[in-house]
Amino acid sequence: MSIIVAVDIGGTQMRAAAYTQDQVSPLQQKKIPTLASKPGGLERLFKVIEDVLPNDREISAIGIGSPGPLDPHTGYLLAPPNNPEWHNFPLAPRVQEHFGVRTFLDNDANLAGLAEYRFGAGQGHRNVLYITVSTGIGAGVVIEDRLLQGFHGLAAELGHSIIDPDGPPCSCGFNGHLESFSSGPAIVKYALAELEAGTKSILKPDDSLNARDIADAALKGDELAIRAYQRAGEYLGIGVASFLHAFDPSVVIFGGGVSQVGRLLFDPFEASLRRRVFHPRYLEGLVITQAQLGDNAGLLGARALAEMKSGFR
Amino acid sequence: MSIIVAVDIGGTQMRAAAYTQDQVSPLQQKKIPTLASKPGGLERLFKVIEDVLPNDREISAIGIGSPGPLDPHTGYLLAPPNNPEWHNFPLAPRVQEHFGVRTFLDNDANLAGLAEYRFGAGQGHRNVLYITVSTGIGAGVVIEDRLLQGFHGLAAELGHSIIDPDGPPCSCGFNGHLESFSSGPAIVKYALAELEAGTKSILKPDDSLNARDIADAALKGDELAIRAYQRAGEYLGIGVASFLHAFDPSVVIFGGGVSQVGRLLFDPFEASLRRRVFHPRYLEGLVITQAQLGDNAGLLGARALAEMKSGFR
């Protein structure tokens, strides 16, 4: 039986795994440090793939997930974070050439969404909206069993939806994006601004303050901290209302570190969503849930991409 | 050769046409008044279909376009405007039963988008964003050659994207939707509010004032009128920027009466879009253009739907 090789290039780790068609668990897997800013990244990538290749089986396809921006149609990385060596770099073509196997590339958020659709919280759904709330806000959208990629491969950048044209600056430099209201750094920035304005809180206006600290303070009843999450949840509800109007999915799946705070974020989110959805039918049968695959989403998404694109499944 | 029958149920006219696979022009067509508020709508619909049926040919499928909300998966109308007889009404199943032919239903904006993709300004594109700017703002989205419908059939309601959470009320009752900034009535409402606030203009604060009057005044150099279109165009650019981030189409097609004012709306639109798109790659090769099919979009869209869903093409 032939196999699929999946690679997940993360900020700190590069992971590879080999899968047969009938098993969710890999035959073999391996992880090594990414060392994005150090030369030799392509050789490290070749090596980690070689380390998981079984000797006796044919490889059907290779799937690779990486932070964007990238072009899934050509397999080029455009400008990966902290890695000048890989700017405008033909990653998938080079891997394809080296191993003689069809190779497919897409970004980490798209692939996490695809993984949840195939193997996680989206199983049984054909229209899936996956949103990761973390340092940034990313998304992956599946429409009628197909991953939404777009003409340039830049679709589903829902963290950069404009929620309020006069809103705060986003990490990308533009104003009022969902990410600028509801990501971890946005929550911290709001709390720091409130502290600076003299609002009472057990939080300290400290450079090391993070979204987890604010969640801890909120759970202790700190009003500023609670309000910081309420605001993030309210804007997340506004954004997701518009995404329902656009995509009309049957499941919304949340991943990412910030989404693990639970009701602190999701109570205000759900209240806001219900207040903003313009027709009640969007919510009929809609499942809102947490991602199930955790750290494995990247690898399983790269696997699902390779299977989907190669016709293996 | 078998044929497709298309029906376009408009606010004032109900039109039907019969098409062969190889011709864009219909074999036969007919139009009658819709008379939405009068009983007997289903019988009028049956009659207008019968009137275009050729005697000697097999019908492959029937496609019907109607104002929403409706459910394209079940073929039910949910709550068509001005027609209490057709609330929660199984329109496509009834037609299918009567003629013994597979019948498909979708809303007018989705079908106009599908028509432009197949026969109009979107030909040759696989990822199409169609936006109609008129009394309301509707949209139709084609992704990799497939019409975006969604789980409940309510996708692509882009006129109800939240552009500013504190924005003016939309016709649907919710606040800050694109339609509440950039539709014809929104342009009129802004101009009337400015007139009431004492802004100088050649426009008269009159109940009959419409978007066309304001366009005429703008073309004569009236500053208030120019500003009213500038504002509509700016918000349209904000909305479309988010739609590019979401769908990443290769063509954006504008239809609807308001979009016919030309540069008055589209100069500020394009400037706003360019200022708001968060990565220049979305604009590479992107075509922004006007709809080509005019009044025939509804019929051709219903035809394209029936062909697509029946596997006729």
Image: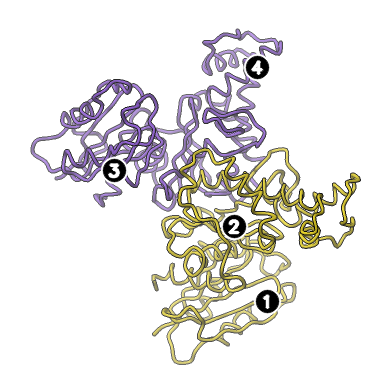
Chain colours: A purple, B yellow
Distance (Cα) linking label 1 and label 2: 22 Å
Q: Is residue B250 left or right of residue B191?
A: left
Above or below: residue B100 compared with residue A162: below
What residue does disc 3 label?
A104
Q: Secondary structure at mark 1?
A: strand
Q: Earlier in the sequence, mark 1 or mark 2?
A: 1
Q: Residue flagged by tag 2: what amino acid is it?
A: Ile
Q: Give me the C-alpha separation between circle 2 and circle 3.
A: 33 Å
- The quadrant holding residue B214 is bottom right
Q: What numbered label is drawn on residue B131?
A: 2
Question: How far apart are the alpha carbons under marks 1 and 3?
Answer: 50 Å
- Residue assigned mark 4: A193
**Is label 2 in a helix, a strand or a loop?**
strand
Quarter of the image with the N terminus of chain A is top left
Q: Residue at x 20, y 41 (%)?
A: A20
Circle nearer the N terminus (4, 3): 3
Q: What is the crowding at mark 2: few (fewer than 14 residues within 10 Å), some, or many (at least 20)?
A: many
| Relative height, residue A196 to residue A149 (above, below) | above
